Image: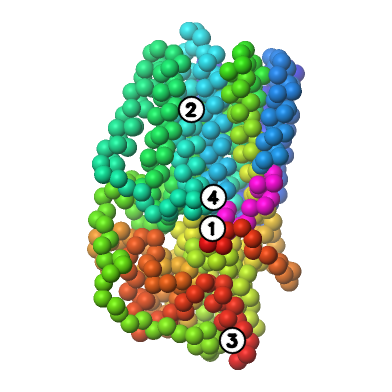
Amino acid sequence: MNQNLYDLLGLGVAVCFIMALKGLSSPKSARRGNLIGAAGAFAATDLVFFAPGATHNHKWWILAAIAVGVLVGVPAARKIQMTQMPQMVALFNGVGGGAAALVAIVEYLKLGSTASTAEVLATVFTVIIGCVSFSGSIVTFLKLQEIMTTRPVVFPGGRFVIAGTLVGVLGTAEWVVHSLGNTSLTVMAVLSLLFGVLFVLPVGGADVPIVISLLNAFTGLSVAASGYVLQATLLIVAGTLVGASGTILTRLMAAAMGRSLFGTLFGAFTAKPQAAVEGGEVRSVKSGSPDDVAILLNYAQRVVIVPGFGLAVAQAQHTVRELADLLNSKGVDVAYGIHPVAGRMPGHMNVLLAEANVPYEQLVEMDEINPTFPQTDVVLVVGANDVVNPAAKTTHGCPIYGMPILDVASAGNVIFLKRSMRPGFAGIENELLYDPKTTLLFGDAKDSLTKVVSALKAL
Amino acid sequence: MSNGLALLSIFVLSVFIGFEVVSKVSTTLHTPLMSGANAIHGIILIGAITVTDRATNNLQLGLGVAAIVLATINMVGGFVVTDRMLEMFKGKPRVKKEVEVAGGETK
């Protein structure tokens, strides 16, 4: 195939990717967009075998490797439950970053002394960012899968260790550029992997949406840089699109948490330890039975459901929908108040509720739902805590101070479905739990909801 | 215009297109955006195939094959998972009851 035709077809694939992202501007066109993107990717993979200058020396190796990838990737993607989506996305992101790093390493091994400085720099950049994205995503995956603790992991002098590692990475990068040797590259790759681990460790569960978006942007950038090395415009365009999407999401998530990106990533090291989390005086809370909750809901005119990570953990999305339908049939107006960082990835709650066939018109964003809380009779908080914690407004110096919250305190009644009195991920007491208009229903969210549904049916 | 400069121009223009397109994505679809973008960077697969094709020794071949496996998982898995998600957002909900027998993680 001649070069011009090949490049032209590559441009077509790039357009497919842009269409894929463009489709996401509305739920109606989204699926078709994704299929266009997939078709483009499939075409590109076929095309590359006919690329000008292809040797076909290792054709069988290549086909076998693709087959292995498909056999691993497709079943994993099909079997995963919607509640586990964040870790799946983290994992796919990580392997993508790893692939980009490996591609750059192979390319580096072939770079002769004729390589231009720009090429060497792009290669080094790809290796560093790809490695950071790989190891960082793996740690994120381990946290989300609860294979390791979801709490921030801090150790004495952590900030200095991280800073030191970063300096080490940059120092060896300098060494790599000058020596073009294999030892220096190996050292740099290992340090980059270490940096990726160190920089995700101190991030707590609730900050994971930010980190996931950031790592997504990293992988995109490393792919774009590898495109520069390989002189492949398609990789540059695709990688940059992903970089832009990751950057925008990171900014949105950071804004939704009311803090800077830097504060999120390194906050755990500077925050004062929350001593009062476990002890403290025992204060009375009003705990209710499923029947009490059912009665409250039954006589409400407007109910807002606020889902959080606990909904995902309990896999309660279908039961929530059942409850909402039941209330609807009794003439109660039901909406869902979605906080941008509820859950473990951007838009996590939307996907879960969509799985349960909740019409997306009922999912209301924070800015729109907040003014309606004074007219709301009952707010049902299902497995959320920090996103409704008034401490974000009132307590200076607490870790979530300044984070915009769902203003549920202005509603008539608040019902919390909680597993225990344990505070949310940020580790802050929630004053709202002790408010006289708050009722607590302890237990697994799904069990509790099932009981409420049957109590409501009996009324 | 030199080749390097041409690639740089493509990069800069792509940044603007990316921001333009992605900033129009509805909040509801942020998770599919993330996983869709994930799938798109799986296109590193063609880079992996290219370097493997040109491999001149076993080390390069081995690393290239590993890159292909990872990139394929990323790309194929990413598109499949995004499709599964978007399927749920499609159109009005039917009365279809999805009985999901919850396996896996129940912690």
- Alpha carbon of mark 2 to alpha carbon of mark 4: how far? 24 Å
- Mark 4 / mark 3, whichever is N-terminal: 4
Residue segment shown in magenta: A74-85
Q: Which of marks 1 and 3 is in front?
A: 3
For disc 4, the neighbor class at 10 Å (few under 14, some 14 to 19, many from 20) is: many
Secondary element type, mark 2: helix
Image-based side of A397 in relation to A428, left or right: left
- Alpha carbon of mark 4 to alpha carbon of mark 3: how far? 35 Å
Image-based side of A356 in relation to A138, left or right: right
Q: Nearer the viewer, mark 2 or mark 4?
A: 4
Secondary element type, mark 3: helix
Residue at screen point 43% across, 79% down: A440
Q: Which amino acid is tagged 1?
A: His
Label for residue A348?
Answer: 1
Q: Which amino acid is tagged 3?
A: Ala
- Mark 1 / mark 3, whichever is N-terminal: 1
**Rendered location of residue A310, percent (x, y):** 50, 66
Label for residue A87?
Answer: 4
**Rendered location of residue B99, percent (x, y):** 70, 67
**Rendered location of residue A349, percent (x, y):** 54, 62
- Mark 2 / mark 4, whichever is N-terminal: 4
Chain of residue at mark 2: A
Residue A380 counted in the magenta span: no
Secondary element type, mark 1: helix
- Alpha carbon of mark 2 to alpha carbon of mark 3: how far? 58 Å
Name the foreground residue: B75 vs A149. Answer: A149
Label for residue A104?
Answer: none
Q: Which residue lies furthest to the bottom in this view?
A: A459
Quadrant hosting residue A163: top left
Q: Mark 2 points at which residue?
A: A126
